[in-house]
Every structure is written in structure tokens, then in C-alpha cells.
Amino acid sequence: MSGAALAQASPVPGCAEAPVLRERGQREVFCGLTGIIWLHRKIQDAFFLIVGSRTCAHLMQSAAGVMIFAEPRFATAIIEERDLAGLADANEELDRVVNQLLARRPDIRLLFLVGSCPSEVIKLDLSRAASRLNATHAPGVRVLNYSGSGIETTFTQGEDACLAALVPEMRADPAPGLLVVGALAEVVEDQMRRLFAALGIGPVAFLPPRRAAELPGIGPGVRFLLAQPFLAETARLLEARGARRLAAPFPLGAEGTTAWLRAAAEAWGVPATRFREVTAIGEQRARTAIARHRGPLAGRRIFFFPDSQLEIPLARFLSRELGMRPVEIGTPYLHRQHLAEELALLPADAVLSEGQHVDRQLDRCRAARPDLVVCGLGLANPLEAEGFATKWSIELVFTPIQGYDQAGDLAELFARPLHRRATLMV
Ligand code: SF4
């Protein structure tokens, strides 16, 4: 059965009236392996070894593009037919590949064995392989594992799985502190650090860290802010270790960034006047940068296909700060608790959909005739050929978009396809 089902009204604040269209069927999404592309740049002494097939290697090659020539810190150990014949051989082969890799790359401190569809289907036990390899390579290298397979994960859920694998590695630390969770570009992380320092909030740590040895401590004193909306499992594990999540919208746009910072400021008891002093200039700068793109975007109708789970925060930003009108906001997975603050800020008439039945969704998109469609690469060109302006959603994950100083760039990412279209039509 793959039909769409119109669910009961979901109990979410602000959107309590809006039903969520839950769909199951053919999907046009990436698997979680793609998360490696930004994660390997972030954790600078980590290596990601995918245990998969040639298909997985091809996916990474296409998605990473030119980076594959720059000695990246990821690779695929390809499961050959020979390995399929006997799991014992596959384990031996994996150990051999890892030993060779670590001998050749002494800079690696953290090695992730990343599961794929083929490794899961043949039931290769990567957690056992990780503990076996740990015994050989500790303490110089820590070996962990997680799944990035298309069976278990969609696109950014690969990051969630990776960070979730790091949580048990965090040392117990009863000291109070703020933990920012979710891979952010370094420039964004540095800006956030400066803002928290000016507010007197700290100590502040980031997960993932830039280096394996900088993995922060965790305990009941820690309050954490999610910087990304797709970290359900990581958040659950952090809470299981006593940390508490600070509920907030995500730091996209001027409004989102201020609300996100405010959640930490309130938890730290920062006086309101001090908060305004520290945030006013950045917020104003963001509003000015955003206003430059309002003209072409205000009043335009936008349709989101599900991709990264960033769709809801993006729709909130585009509707409230740029005057766009979300027609349908598709998300691969809707975590109501983490998105409660976002849902409360969405326009009441926006349709929310969770999961995908791509043909039905294409039909709805065609019927709605939106001015801009946010979708993956597989749908973008065919939709352009049908006369739709599209925005590739993958760029929203690879580009620094969080915080005040990126708010103008974020607005521009949506203005550009409309601008290009107008230019080409002249
Ligand atoms: S993990 Fe699965 S979905 Fe992803 S590239 Fe490999 S085979 Fe394809």
C-alpha cells in the first residue's frame, strides 16, 4: 500500500488547524552517505570509510564532485562478490583495508565505518568490526560506526547518525555549559562563539568538534541548542545523558537567529537590555541584507519537495522575512517537538507534507503552479523544462546559511533562480 493518507489534525501549536499529509511511496531523496561530504570537512582528523558497493562509491563521487581529487578523508571499501560469499572473508578484508589505511594516513584520529544498503543486507556487523579494530588501534585511533544507508537514513539523517555515534564517546562532565549541536560552517561557528562570549554565556562547546580530541563533556549541567532540525536521535541520546534541550526556532534569518540566541540568554539569565545591546547590530545588519531581496520574492508562491528537514525553518524564514507564500512544505520527517517553535510561526494556510509519493507530489506541484520549487537535482531540470523556476535544495546544506551575517546570502539563494529566469526571458 503506498497511497497518501490525510492524517488527523496534528497537535502542533500554531499549525493545530493544519493537517499533515503523510505520504509513502516512490521517493526522490539522497541516502545518508551524503552527510559525509560536509562532515569530513568539519571534523578535520576523522576519516569516513563507507563499507558499500560501487553504487555507493559512484554516489559519493558525483556528490563530492571536484573534492575527490583533493585527498579527501572518505573512501569506499567495496564489497565484492567474493565477500558476499562468506562474511568471514568480508571481515578479514575490512580489517586489512583499515590497517592499510591507518598505516598510510597517520593523521587520522577518528575512523567511522559507515554502513550502507549492501552491508546491511548481508548483515555485516560493523559495530563488532569497530570494537575489534579499536582493540588493535587504540589509543591512537578511535573506530566508530554508524549507518548512512538508504534503507535507514535520508540525506541529513546521516549527520544525525554520525553525531549519535559520538555521544557515547563524550566523557561525563557535571560542569554547566552550553552545547551547540549540528555541523555548522566554521565561519558561522566563529560568529556564534563571539555572540555567546559577548552575552556572557559559556563555556560553549560544539558537536561535532573540529578535532576528535576536542569532543566535549556531557552531563546534567549541560543545556544544548540544536543548530539543525534533523538531529532527533542525537538529541535523544544527549537527553539520556542528562543534558537538557533549549527549545528554540533554528538560527535562519534575523528573527530565527535572535530567537535562537534568546533561548540561551534566558537560560543563562542574561538581562534583556544586555541581550539587545549585543544582538541589535547583527540583527539590523541581517534585516538590511534581507531587505535587498524582498522585492523579487515578496508575494511569490513557493513549493518545497522533501529533502533535508530544513524545509520548515526555511519556509518560516521566507514567509515572515521575505513575504513569500509557502504552498506546500514537504519534509522527509517531521519531528514535532523540535519543530514546535517553527510550526507556530508558519502561515496557517501552508500545507505540510511528511514523507513522499513523488508522482502525487509532482501532480500537486503542477496544479499549484508555484513561482519557485525547491527540490533535489533529479527533479530540478525536468521541472525547469516544464516551465518552473527551481532551487536546488542541496545547496542549502552545503552553503553557510545560519546566523545574522549569512541571512542576506540565504535570501539571495532563493532570489537568484527567479532573477536568472527573468534575465533569460528578456
Ligand atoms: S547506501 Fe544504499 S542508497 Fe546509498 S548509495 Fe549505497 S546503495 Fe545507494
Image (cartoon, rainbow, N blue to C red):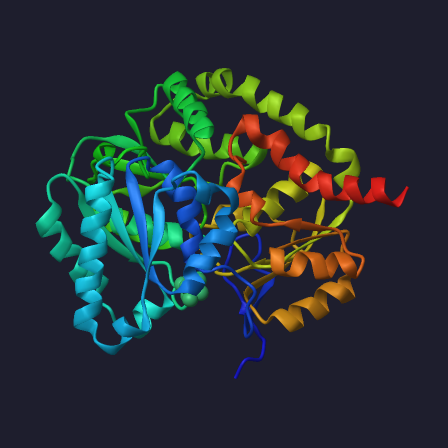
Q: Position of residue 152 (x, y in %)?
A: 38, 65
Q: Quadrant of residue 321?
A: top right
Q: Quadrant of residue 208?
A: top left
Instruction: Decide which of 38, 309 is in the foreground and name it.
Output: 38
* Location of residue 262 with respect to 422 vertically, above or below: above
> In the image, what residue occupies the spot 48% across and 17% down?
278
Q: Position of residue 17 (x, y in %)?
A: 60, 61
State ligand 1's quadrant.
bottom left
**Along the horizontal axis of the image, is 299 left or right of 197?**
right
**Along the horizontal axis of the image, is 246 left or right of 343?**
left
> In the image, what residue occupies the spot 56% across and 44% down?
396
Instruction: Decide which of 72, 329 is in the foreground and name it.
Output: 72
> In the image, what residue occupies the spot 9% across and 50% down?
136
Give the farthest residue toward the left.
Answer: 135
Q: Is residue 242 visible?
A: no
**Along the horizontal axis of the image, is 175 left or right of 378?**
left
Quarter the C terminus occupies: top right
Q: Is residue 269 visible?
A: yes
Instruction: Decide which of 42, 94 is in the foreground and name it.
Output: 94
> In the image, what residue occupies the spot 57% across and 59% down?
306
* Location of residue 27 with respect to 411 vertically, above or below: below
Q: Position of residue 317 (x, y in %)?
A: 61, 41
Give the farthest residue toward the bottom.
Answer: 1
Q: Position of residue 77 (x, y in %)?
A: 31, 58
- Give the number of callouts: 0
